[in-house]
Image (tube, rainbow, N blue to C red):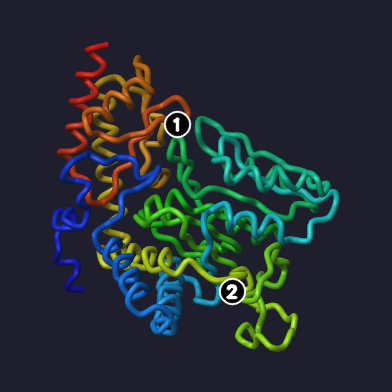
Amino acid sequence: MSSHKKSLEDYRKEFPVTNRYIYLDHAGVAPISLRVKMAVEKFLSEATQNGMFNYKQWMDGVEQIRKKSATFIAGEPEEIAFVKNTSHGISIVAEGLDWREGDNLLLCENDFPSNVYPWLNLKRKGVEIRVAQSRNGRILLEDIEMLIDSRTRLLTVSSVNFSNGFKIDLKMAGELCRRRGVLFFVDAIQSLGVVPMDVNEFKIDFLSADGHKWLLGPEGSGIFYCRKERAQRLNPSLIGWKSIINESDYDHIDFRLKTNALRFEEGSLSVMGIFALGAAIDLLIEVGIDRIQSRVIELGDLIIREAEKRDFQVRTPKDKEERGGIISIIGSFNPINVKDRLKEEGILVNVRGGAIRVSPHFYNTGHEILSLFNAMDKVIKSN
């Protein structure tokens, strides 16, 4: 494709944030690109000048973005619902399944709260929560399998751990779930946009991800994937006019729910947010997800090398197959103080689990990584 003739360096022009800052917190809240900004401005201009005259065109655009979102994860358009955030998608599943007292589900130790609290809330229904313990920062499939029994309904995992960057083997986890008759849920917010995703190869039943991290979109718009044969097993906890098959027949009440993921879009959509998300996904598709992953892994290798030169401890697995875009490091320094001092220097990283978390994207450069460590040297020395 001709787009691949464009260098990654050229794409830096899409991100004006690079003119002022070294931005290394894509695992937190990412900056948006110029094309995302333009998509929002175009919608605002049309809404201002034309009002509802553009409505059909907008709805057609939403369906095109639904198709792109499905292609991005190797699913089908009718398996995609637009949600306001990752927690929204998780709660659709947690509250939608017909849990029975005595059922159990499996989650992973040290997961992000979004992928914990909706499941803990099921204790009120008599559901047992079983936790796969972390071993040296990793979740092992044999530990998960030991927790499965005849009453296990679902396994939920994060594709990449938000704190130490461990990337679980989704293919093996999906095969385990399918073999044992367990539903498989993936919180993909820390990998979607930097790691290729194939919901069929990985045998994923449900997936949720907001757009504001590696997808490089704004907060408040994300995608929820529901495998088509699972949709009718979920009873929507939110119901509205768009949940219904004949959604445009306002004069007749006919309570028949849609049979696919669109049953979870209960009312009017955040059209502006969806257009922003669509523009973000367009950019990632243009660059190429394999190319993005290679670049981010390469930058991760550089971070690991520079950290080890300074005798910092790397908490992230060094094996390329076991990490996404997050590199987590600790040393004989106060991580909060270092993070705050770096921010004063225009370098954005974060702290999770008592460690400095560095999360570059494809448009970052090796020079920026070296600048980060040079700044860290000065900060640590001045303390």
Q: Residues within 10 Å of mark 1 (few under 14, many from 20)?
A: some
- Which amino acid lies under the numbered mark 1 shown in the image of this protein? Arg
Name the residue nearer the viewer: 179 or 94. 94
Tell me the residue at 39%/63% (across/down).
Answer: 277
Name the residue nearer the viewer: 307 or 61. 61
- In the picture, which quadrant includes the N terminus? bottom left
Identify the disc placed on residue 262: 2
Q: Quadrant of residue 7?
A: bottom left
Vertical position of residue 183 compared to residue 116: above or below: below
- In the picture, which quadrant includes the C terminus? top left
Q: Position of residue 128 (x, y in %)?
A: 78, 44
- Which amino acid lies under the numbered mark 2 shown in the image of this protein? Leu
Q: Position of residue 302 (x, y in %)?
A: 24, 37
Q: Earlier in the sequence, mark 1 or mark 2?
A: 2
Identify the disc placed on residue 352: 1
Comparing labels 1 and 2, the label whose residue is closer to the camera: 2
Vertical position of residue 146 compared to residue 209: above or below: above
**Mark 1 and mark 2: Cα distance apart in space:** 35 Å
Question: With 229 as the anchor, is 298 left or right in this view?
Answer: left
